[in-house]
Structures are given as structure tokens and as C-alpha cells.
Amino acid sequence: MSYNADSRGYYGEFGGAFIPEMLYPNCEELRQNYVQVMQEDSFKKEFQQLLKDYVGRPTPLYFAERLSNKYNTKIYLKREDLCHTGAHKVNNTIGQILMAKRLGKNRIIAETGAGQHGVATATVCALMGIECVVYMGEIDIQRQAPNVARMKMLGAEVRPAKSGSRTLKDATNEAIRDWINNPVDTHYIIGSVVGPHPYPDMVARFQSVISEEIKWQLKEKEGKENPDYVVACVGGGSNAAGAYYHFLDNPDVGIIAVEAAGKGIDSGESAATSALGKVGIIHGSKTLLMQTADGQITEPYSISAGLDYPGVGPMHAHLFKSGRGEFISITDADAMQAGLELSKLEGIIPAIESSHAFAILETRKFEADDVVIINLSGRGDKDLNTYIDYFKL
Amino acid sequence: MTNRISQKLQEDKKLLSIYFTAGYPSLSDTVNVIEGLEKNGVDMIEIGLPFSDPLADGPTIQESSTKALKNGMTTEVLFDQLKDIRKTVSIPLIIMGYFNPMLQYGVEAFCQKCQEIGIDGLIIPDLPVDVYNEEYKTIFEEHGLVNVFLITPQTSDERIRFIDSVSSGFIYMVSSASVTGAKSGFGDEQTHYFDRIAAMKLKNPQIVGFGISNNETFTAATEKAKGAIIGSAFIKHLTAFGADKFDNFVNNIR
């Protein structure tokens, strides 16, 4: 069984492109070109150069000794939090802005929830001198003022999504509508491994630099390329897709996906899509999503704005359904404690998204000689207010 | 039995088709709106099954969908409201909605229910023609349902030919690259597009939608095409005047 997308963008039964005809030319242009463009030497060279000089790659693979001692196993952190702009998101936006340039686009649109992908998109648009419009839910704009300001400083226009629940899913709807209205000159930079084919596959390929580096870095440190486990948090799932990518077809590497349980799976306020979702269509992709019995998409909840997406990328839906991935959900409370613990034990304040991945260490036991890689997808600066409020700091 | 849509398409006149969102402005308005439109001479009706995330729609239809859902509209409720509709209404009825609610109901069960009620066709903007062709065409045909596909000014000739070959009622010509309710009026691009499609001499007649709101745009859209669909403009009328006064709206169109 393959865990990557087939030529039609399916991961098992999940994926595809369930899009209105108005979007067909846009997606088709991308589908016909993305693999070929990514394989061009000039593209690879420019992409790798920017990842090195601008993003700061390779990011370290850090042996977390004190954390390892506490949990009696060998834990390495993949330091995506050290990327420019503070998270792995920029790997994808660099790739897609170069793709957009190759396709002759002169206008970029993006959706954002907490603002991290919006900032990463605004950043690369500033870098390339390309017009940038970021759609953000009206409610998120109020909650994430510093990121709104960052996007504005970077020259992007932030447009409020006022429809529906006025959060990430609606920002995504608005971005898609913009793309329908501007099919020729505009490229839509989706921020995760979601949306219609070829987005999940394209974004996973751009993020796959994470696991590519893990392989050679682990070889240097442990004398072997393959860890026993790779752990990552999953909202839409782009950091996880990148961290798993080069290990997907190796059954010796355990894949652990950590979802946000919010206030608890059965609380009605959760974002644990694998536990609560059913097969359906969201944003052009057939995947697992949280919905009513009647097929209306529901609003998820997590303390972490980056994890409260009602769906999950089709790659992850397939990893779940096939049993290739082990899915664990973590509550707000446990994630916050894990974030505090990492700060105190290792001197690293993680993004709350990433904190979810660390929280499994309390319950999911590993052998003493297991090599466990935890993808530290982002840093906690953006979440300081949430930490302050939560811990009364 | 010949499908009502096919019969209607053979009539020697330009067809006026109206879209509205089921359960809007009030939950119980669905049947009133359908009966009222037929009384006022409308040729065909698209009944919108509301969805939480209608990607292809602009703010007017999205807001009406949000309201309809708040009013309590569901797939079950709609089918229940429509169960006796064929006792009073004889023009073609089409359900227009996004694929996810149909998927959750079960595509076969959905089609079965449509057949029982006397629904003639479906328009599902986010069910791509290739997926329909491979997975669902047989089910639709077994239940006597016409599935209507969209084309846009950006759709290639080759793809239009393919869509024409899979279609069995009419082709929904989206007048411009836009979501619903985004533009009004037509420019050179539309005229060129209307001419181009007419010259292709497709086997299925075409009905134009998006951007039609009055007599002028209706006349322009139907110069070459068989008919036109009005959606957002009618929703605005419902919002302003409620669900029982349609004569002034319909009479202003043609």
C-alpha cells in the first residue's frame, strides 16, 4: 500500500478534487505543472537556496536530554520553531511563491486562522514584491491582533471573512471565492495539506524537507536514518505530513499523529477529527471532517488556533483509516502543561500546537532505546498571551 | 416517462428559471415560493438545499443558506415539505445543492427520494463531471434524474464537448468567472462567450446563469441560449418583500 497521493490525488479513498467548475481551470493548470516545475533544476536550486539563506535551514535535530531522562527514552526535537517567521509554514509558502512565479501569477491570496500562515505568506510576497491578500475570519482578526499587524507591516492586505462562523473555514471559503473571481492572474497559497488535488500533495512535498533532513541528521547522531517513531501534531496536518513524508513507506517507523481534543472528545468542544469526523467533502477534498448528521460542517474548538480545523488532510485520513498512523488526542489542559514542562526542562517555549505532540509523553510509553522524534513545529511567542492567561503568569 | 425538463426544453420559448433557498425567509415558505413562482409563469425552479460552506456562492445566497439552516432546514425537512408538491405543481423542479449533505444522506437514497417526490434533476456544483461519470451516473439515470453541469468562459472546448456528452438535460452556462451574485450586466467577454458556445452546436441546450437580474440581462443572456436562471436577485426580492409577492418580480424580467 502506498501512503502518498496517486496521480488523481487520492490517498486510498480520500482526496480528489471536488470543486465547482469555476475552479477547474485554476486547479488543472496547477495539476499539470506542479510536479514538473518542482523537478526543474533551476526551481530546486532557488528553493533550496532560499530555505538555507532566508529560512535558516537545515533546522537542528536536537537531542533533548533532560526530557529523555524524564521519560526514559531517546527524544529528539526537530526544531521547525527556529524557521524564519517562527514555524514550518514558511517552507510551503517559499515553495508556492516560486511556483506562482513560474506560472506567471502576479497576485497571491491566502487564508489564515491564527495568522501564522498569513504571516508566512505575507513574508514571501514581500520578499518577491508580489501583491498579497490574506483572508482571515472576523473573529480571528480580533483574537490575533499582533499577527494582523505583522501582515500589514509586511505589505499584505488583510480582508475579514464575515460569512458563516467567521473563522478559519470561512476564511478558506472566501479565499476560494476570490480565486473563482480571479482565475487568471492569481495563485492561491493554501497553508496546509488540505483542499483539492494537487494541494495536499504539493504542500506535503514542500514540507517533506523536514523528514529529508531528519534522515541525514539522525544518521550523523545515531548511525541510522530511521527513528522508531515520528510524532507530530495534526490540525490540517502540514507539519506532520512533512515530518512523516520520507518514512511513510517504511513500516519500521511508527507514525504518531496528535490531535486537539479541546475540552475533551465528548465535550462538544473539540477538534479531534479522526475521533469525531465522518467521511465527507470539505474545501474540495474528500476526507474525514466534523459535521452534523445532515452534512453541515461544524465549528471545531481547540485552545490552539492552528489546530481548530474541522477537517484533516486526506493523507492523514488515510493514515488513520488504514491503521498506518497511531492517532492520539490531547486536551487543552494536558497540552498547556506539556508546553510549560518543555519550557522548564529544555528552555524552549513551544507553540501550543506543538505542545500537543509533547503531551503524549505522559501516557504513551516508549522503550528506553526507542528513538522518538517530535516535530517542534512552531515557537510559542505568538501564544504568550494564552500562556499568560492560562497560568496567571 | 419523458423527464419534465426535456419536455420543457422543447417548448418554443425562452425559459425563465428561478433559484431560491429552501426554508428562506421562513422555514415553511418553501412550498409557497414554488407554487407562487409557477402561478406567475416561471418555467423551471431550482430549489436550493442549504449548505454551511457554499463555495460557489456569493454573500446573498450564502446568507440565505445560513438563515435557512438556522430556521431548521435539513435534507429530511426539505423532502418532507416537498412530499405532496406534485399535487399542485407541474413545472420541472431541480434540487441544487452541494455534495456533502447528499453524501451523508446517501447518494442512492437521495436519488430515490427525489424520484418519489417528482424531482426532475440535480445541480451539484462540487461534484465533478468525471467523478459523476464513473461513480454516480447509473444511479441518477435509474431514478430518472437529469444531472446538470456547469461550464464557464474558462472551460475549454474539449471539456465542454465531454460535459455535453455526459449531460442529458441542459448545460448550465455560468456567465462569467465569478461566484453567484458578484456581477450584473454583460460585457464583450460574455458576448464572445455566448457566440462561441452557440457556434459549438452542442447536443444539449444551454441555460445561462450568474449575473442575470432584470429584463435587459435576461434578454441578452437568452439571445443565443435557451433560457436563463436568476438566483441572487430573487433572494434579494424575497428578503425585501417576503414569500408571497412575485408578480412584480417576474413581470420585470420578461
Image (cartoon, coloured by chain):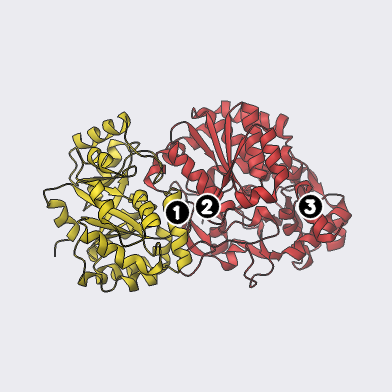
Q: Which residue is mark 1?
A: B62
Q: Are marks 1 and 3 in contact (CB under 8 Å)?
A: no
* Residue furthest left in the image: B12
Q: Give the camera-side residue of A79 and B114.
A: B114
Give the percent coordinates (x, y) of residue B237.
Answer: 36, 53
Relative side of B51 to A329, left or right: left
Q: Is residue B179 above or below residue A102?
A: below
Dot 1: element: helix
Q: Amino acid at mark 2?
A: Ser
The picture's colour for chain B is yellow
Give the class, few, some or many, for how many residues have Cα within 10 Å of label 2's Cα (few <14, many ≥20): many
Name the quadrant containing residue A363.
Answer: bottom right
Q: Are marks 2 and 1 in contact (CB under 8 Å)?
A: yes
Q: Amino acid at mark 1?
A: Gln
Colour red maps to chain: A
Give the percent coordinates (x, y) of residue B144.
Answer: 22, 64
Q: Residue at x 59, y 63 (%)?
A: A273
Tag shown at residue A166: none
